[in-house]
Amino acid sequence: MQFFCVRTQAIQQTHQALLQLQGRRRGSSKPSRALRVASLYGHLQWRARPTGVVCFAIRELAEAWHLQPRLLRDDLADLQAMGWLSYSTGPQGTRAELHRQGSSTPAPQRSIELKAPSDLVEQFAATYNRHRPGSWPAYQPKGAVLLPRLQRAIRYAGSPESLWERSAAALSAMPSFWRETYPNGRSGSDCIAALLSADRKAAGLGPEFWHVFTWGAGACGRDADLERARRLFLWDGHQWRGQGIEALKLQAAEKQRLIERLEAEGHGPTGSAALQFQQPAEMY
């Protein structure tokens, strides 16, 4: 096993970037926190090779690092505020796109320019009305009542344009209950409120659980499978080896499916998974 360390320069750079956040900072202000944030970014850099995009499970990473998940969520929020990455979280996991691959200097901070309240609300309403299913009623903006929740969604998405894209995807991929049953007797305002909120079990956990971000998150599923395969299986030069109890509990067909995702990425000999799982079961 190889151990990779974070450069001192990277830790200093992270510390300075965190200081610049001031009031926008989510996590602890202790100087030692720069080490953890730098380590997280370095970890994501390594996992995101070569595309700069990585899908992962915050809870699983927190367990592996013996941290509370909220600490990593704060770290990700600050990394996004610093302009070093963009991320979104949904049922399929967390998807992060890194903006500083191989760079030795910080990327300029991305600031979200919030336009006049009537402009933002009207743009969101236009996106909703253009992409809503026929069962959902049209929405006519009335003042700026929607603005605070809309601004939270925009900050989480990274920009108004990103939110419009996520909204269109969510409206196209909403579950059948919300498409067929929920809109009965509802107004456009009710449906907008549902789009910018979460299911009851996730209420109060933040914008990442709002329907506008979770309903259209299926595109991350393929990458989530690959990340899971990377975590659970390793080619030892002769055969595929499972890593951890989760890998041991999987059925042979699921093991083969996940490992074939690794083979498609160039890991291990092509066809080795199919050959291995045709054999009598061993300690995979």
Image (cartoon, rainbow, N blue to C red):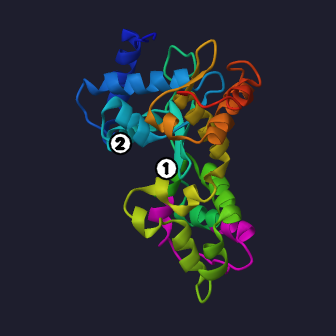
Depth check, front residue: 8 or 183:
183
Residue 248 in percent (x, y) is at 50, 35
Give me the residue at 52% from left, 30% from top: 231
Residue bounds of the magenta highlight: 125-151
Against 8, residue 282 (above or below) is below
Q: Which mark sits nearer the N-terminus, 1 or 2? A: 2
Q: Which residue is mark 2?
A: 69
Residue 174 visible in the snapshot: yes
Occupied quadrant, residue 1: top left
219 or 107: nearer the eye? 219
In this rendering, is residue 91 above or below 16?
Answer: below
Q: Is residue 99 left or right of residue 80?
A: right
Q: Quadrant of the C terminus?
A: top right
Residue furthest to the bottom in view is 185
Crowding around mark 1 (Cα neighbors within 10 Å: few <14, some 14 to 19, many 20+) is some
Residue drawn at x 67%, y 35% is 256
Q: Which residue is mark 1?
A: 155
Q: Amino acid at mark 2?
A: Pro
In x, y percent, where is residue 135?
71, 80
Q: Residue at x 44, y 38 (%)?
A: 81
Does the residue at mark 1 contact the one at mark 2 (Cβ under 8 Å)? no
Q: Residue furthest front?
A: 280
Indicate left or right for 86 with 13 as reference: right
- Say above or below: 76 vs 197: above
Q: Is residue 250 magenta?
A: no
Judging depth in this view, the residue of 112 and 175 nearest the camera is: 175
Where residue 70 appears, as percent x and y from the top left, is 33, 44
